[in-house]
Amino acid sequence: MIAQKKSKTQKKNDGLSLERVSRGATKWIGSIESLIVHTIIFASVISLPLFGISFDTVLLVLTTIVSLEAIYLAIFIQMTVNRNTAQLQEVEKDIEEISEDIEDIQEDVEEISEDIEDIQEDVEEISEDIEDIQEDVEEIQEEDEKEEEVEKKKNDIALEKLEKTLAELLKEIDKLKKK
């Protein structure tokens, strides 16, 4: 069991180191330094026949090396493509989650908008009720004022009657005094 765990861990670490090598190789091969180094190597190999090495041997070795390099480059490039594809899939999942979140937020905003409309309707109804109450209060005040005026007129009339009665009584008292 421990041996299996170690082998899985080792495989994981080996996979990570190969991954690092793949990234480094792909990054270096795509650089200007790589272009310069390859140009120098090819120029040097092609000039080897000048030093007495058979041209057929040079071409055979060069062709073999270039073929092997092309195979490894293809593998490294495919590893990079696979890695980028995995990253794009993760980004796609994130985008889907964000889209779902946006839809949820839009639904929430719509619900809030409906709530705001309901509140505005309630406020309008309350405003109308307040206006009705103010009108009722004004009517009651007008009625109270009318009642006060009627009461005042009644009091004025009663006062006038009392004054007349008093005046008549005073006249009679004066008549009685004179008699």
Image: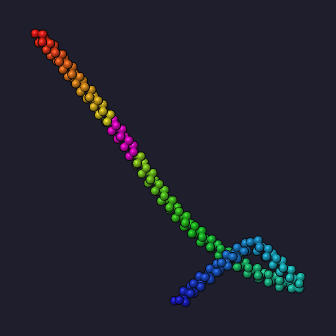
Residues shaded magenta: 122-135
Main secondary structure type of the part rendered in magenta: helix
Vertical placement of residue 176 versus 124, above or below: above
Residue occupying the point 52% across, 61% down: 99
In the image, residue 53 above or below residue 141: below
Q: Is residue 59 visible?
A: yes
Q: Position of residue 57 (x, y in %)?
A: 83, 85
Residue 52 locus on image (x, y percent): 89, 85
Above or below, 58 relative to 82 = below
Q: Residue at x 57, y 67 (%)?
A: 91
Residue 160 position in % (x across, y down): 21, 19
Along the horizontal axis of the image, is 158 left or right of 29?
A: left
Q: Is residue 32 magenta?
A: no
Residue at position x 45%, y 51% in the image: 113
Quadrant assignment for the C terminus = top left
Relative to 25, is 157 on the left or the right?
Answer: left
Quarter of image, res 71: bottom right
- Depth check: 4 or 138 in front? 138
**How far from the left and from the top, in percent, is residue 93?**
54, 67
Camera-side residue: 15 or 176? 176
* In the image, residue 125 lies in the stretch drawn in magenta: yes
User: Closest to the observer: 112 or 138?
Assistant: 138
Q: Quadrant of residue 167?
A: top left
- In the image as oriented, which residue stretches furthest toward the top? 179
Residue 159 picture quarter: top left
Horizontal side of residue 142 vs 21, given as left or right: left
